[in-house]
Image: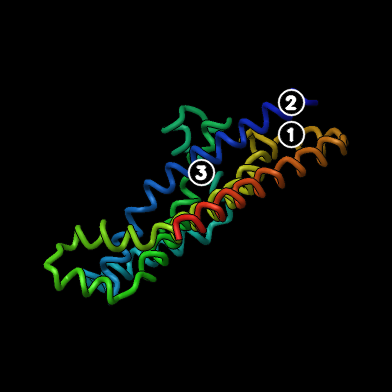
Amino acid sequence: MTEVLLKATWQTIYMVLGSTFFSVVLGFIPAIILTLTASDGLKPNKVVYSILDVLVNIFRSFPFIILMVLVIPLTRFIAGKSIGTTAALVPLTISAIPFVARVIESALREVDGGLIEAAKSFGASNTQIMLRVYLKEAFPAILNGITLTMISLIGYSAMGGAIGAGGLGDVAIRYGYQAYKTEYMIATSVILIVIVQAIQMVGNKLYKKLS
């Protein structure tokens, strides 16, 4: 039991960390575009903002289990297979990108407008304002959003166990549910709770320190 749980725990951590990294990197792109093209942004563009806003909302609406099935062809193309922990990174990342984009956009748009105007008065370019004002001021809030993303991805990775993603969700289903071994169900639940609490605790400490 210990060996099975340790392997599954590392698989879950691998999926969560990997998908968090890729979703944050890719989620920054639409977040910055949304911030720049908003009505109060540095380069307002109603058409671009409206289209991207709708796309983000559409992708956020897909239940994760359905999304995993829909992107199986893409998963096979990128990972070479449709099941397993590495393959699960594809749907996990796709599901998290719109969430990350919205979180980062909200954090950026909460930056004090006075700071933006002050930077403009000093002749700062849009790139300088984005890097030195927006991102610098919003970083604690962005970090808090990344923490929430990781916690959500833990839940998604557990659901992914239902269709071969591996990890603690897979152990809970195969051993706890299908084999009627309650101890596995309890153990996986406790481990998931501990992981979530650890991530939240570290995230809160970093947020307070940076704030």
Q: Which residue is drawn at 35% across and 69% down?
A: 111
SS of the residue at dot 3? helix
**Placement of the N terminus among the 4 image quadrants:** top right
Disc 1 marks which residue?
A: 171
Disc 2 marks which residue?
A: 4
Q: Where is residue 145 in the image (x, y as percent from the top left)?
A: 49, 57
- Label 3 or label 2, whichever lies nearer to me, is 2
- Label 1 or label 3, whichever lies nearer to me, is 1
Q: How many marks?
A: 3
Q: State the colouring used for the structure image.
A: rainbow
Residue 91 disc label? 3
Q: Which residue is drawn at 43% across and 62% down?
A: 102
Q: Residues within 10 Å of mark 1 (few under 14, many from 20)?
A: many
Alpha carbon distance from label 2 to label 1? 8 Å
Q: In which quarter of the image is residue 173?
A: top right
* Residue extending farthest front: 209
Q: Which amino acid, mark 3?
A: Pro
Q: In which quarter of the image is residue 166?
A: top right
Instruction: Say left or right for 77 vs 122.
Output: right
Mark 1 vs mark 3: which is more N-terminal?
A: 3
